[in-house]
Amino acid sequence: MYKKRGLLIVLSGPSGVGKGTVRKELFTQPDTNYEYSVSMTTRSPREGEVDGTDYFFKTREDFESLIEQNKLLEYAEYVGNYYGTPLDYVNETLDAGRDVFLEIEVVGAAQVRAIAPDGLFIFLAPPSLSALEDRLVGRGTETSEVIQSRVLKAREELEMMNLYDYVVENDEVQNACDRINAIVTAEHCRRERVEKRYTQMLEGDY
Ligand code: 5GP
């Protein structure tokens, strides 16, 4: 029997780019049609954060035991704390035909790309990347050291982009959300995905 599987959507990008803000905005919109995978972390809750909604807050011991039991799709250590994606939740939701949305840092995103290359990988880029171009050709408003360090940072960020299918500039949160939604819609219409679905359907006893 043919069963439609959901799309795994991964939003990542350099630290400080505003991934969390964009993700929160996406999930406050009533027409968002995908499920957010709540991550596990060993960091302490911030004021107002709710266990099970913002994160599943875990001790280091518990987290390490989840790693050993292969309960995580990916995990990474970020500024002294573990962050990871629960594997069962992702698989069950995809199997139920619903899209899953991960908002994770770049080391974890690279792991997901290796395991699930048919996912949709979106890189959130800082607007400073395109603003850099203006500064470089600009009127000499920045010292050459400042330009130099920005070029270096931009080069690192450009290298990170390699693993992704799409790049969304976070110029304004709402614009970024609109582009992400447009990408997800387009991705569902991609010929390879549609064709695969029909082939599976025709081969199965539907
Ligand atoms: P924060 O502590 O500010 O909530 O998150 C710190 C970083 O961890 C952010 O870049 C966020 O995207 C990333 N992050 C959140 N959940 C996960 C996860 O499950 N796996 C990975 N690899 N990174 C995560």
Image (cartoon, rainbow, N blue to C red):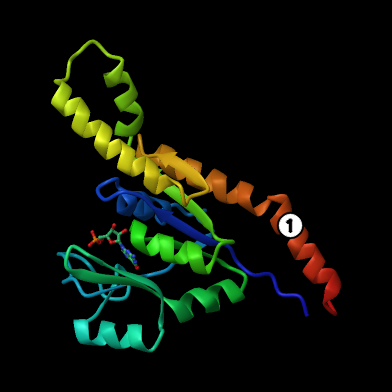
Q: Position of residue 118 (x, y in %)?
A: 59, 61
In the figure, 123 relative to 86: above or below?
Answer: above
Q: Nearer the viewer, residue 195 or 49?
A: 195
The spot of residue 89 in percent (x, y) is: 47, 78
- Horizontal side, residue 163 vs residue 6: left or right: left
- Furthest-top residue in view? 139
**Residue 48, quarter of picture:** bottom left
Quadrant holding the N terminus: bottom right
Which amino acid lies under the numbered mark 1 shown in the image of this protein? Answer: Val
Residue 23 lies in quadrant: bottom left
- At horizontal 80% and vertical 70% (from top left) the residue drawn is 201
The foreground one among 30 and 8 is: 8
Q: In this view, does 54 lie to the left or right of 43?
A: right
Name the residue: 18% across, 71% down.
43
Q: Is residue 25 left or right of residue 100?
A: left
Q: Which residue is drawn at 23% across and 10% down?
A: 139
Using the image, determine if residue 182 lies above or below residue 30. above
